[in-house]
Image: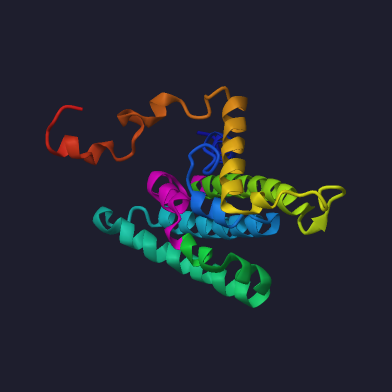
Amino acid sequence: MSKLTILKNGIIKENPVLVLALGLCPALAVSTRATDAVGIGIATTFVLLGSNLVISALRTIIPGKVRIPCYMVLIAGFTTIVQMLLRAYVLTLYQALGIFLPLITINCIIFGRAEMFARKNTVANSLVDAVGVGAGFTLAMFAIGGVREILGNGTLLGIGLPVLSQFHIPVFVLAPGGFVVLGLLIAIVNKASSGKAIKKKDFGCDGCHSSGVCGKRLLGGAE
């Protein structure tokens, strides 16, 4: 694939939240305000860039049997760096993100790109993939956070909006409102792509990166 295709896949076709339905925990918990949503998106993108870079560069050195623990150590290291930077320079955002900042360490989006892309591709392509997926995640977070903040608080990025600032719907900043907004955005994306954002064949054994070590294959059974 060309680098442009890799970039577009991460933003649109393989959008981690609105298409693949990954990273839903921060997508629902840290999206009551657009600023917090963008903050967690940027922090996750930083960790994704660092982990993809190092994992791709060391892909021929890291033994396959211990690759997951190695990924965890690398991702945890970059997450710690992000925590230290936010605590030192953006304390308000650091406090707002709370426990969901260190939980970036076990974010399935980062682990997924490390396992499915970075360990199989060049450093350049892995960095482009990280930018695309990170941008897709951040845009999805901004969309969810923006809609919830507008409807729930009558503000956007902390700025009061005419009419809505007086007639807002507080339920949208609560958990039920988060599920409603997320579901509606996923439905819109699915409708806009005519349900073809990901084709059914993408979920078959032929498209699985772990098909070679699948339990059925190891046992010699039929697929």
Q: Choose top left, top right, bottom left or bottom right for residue 209.
A: top left
Q: How many marks?
A: 0
Residue 161 % position (x, y):
84, 51
User: Would you say residue 122 sits in the magenta stretch?
Assistant: yes
Residue 48 % position (x, y):
51, 55
From this viewpoint, is residue 62 visible?
no
Give the color scheme: rainbow, by chain, secondary structure or one colour.
rainbow
* Horizontal side, residue 54 vs residue 67: left or right: right
Instruction: In the rendered view, tell whether residue 85 sits above or below residue 107.
Output: below
Instruction: In the rendered view, tell whether residue 99 sits above or below residue 107.
Output: below
User: Would you say residue 123 sits in the magenta stretch?
Assistant: yes
Question: Which residue is drawn at the image coordinates 82% and 57% (left, top)?
Answer: 159
Q: Main secondary structure of the magenta part?
A: helix
Q: Nearer the viewer, residue 181 or 197?
A: 181
> What is the span of residues highlighted in magenta in the rendered image?
105-125
In which quadrant of the rendered image does the C terminus lie?
Answer: top left
* Horizontal side, residue 156 vs residue 15: left or right: right
Residue 88 % position (x, y):
63, 77
* Horizontal side, residue 89 vs residue 162: left or right: left
Question: Which residue is drawn at the image coordinates 38% and 66% (left, top)?
Answer: 73
From this viewpoint, is residue 73 visible?
yes
Question: Which residue is drawn at the image coordinates 48% and 29% (left, top)?
Answer: 198
* Horizontal side, residue 162 vs residue 134: left or right: right
Question: Which residue is drawn at the image coordinates 69% and 54% (left, top)?
Answer: 34
* Residue at the left extreme of this rendering: 220
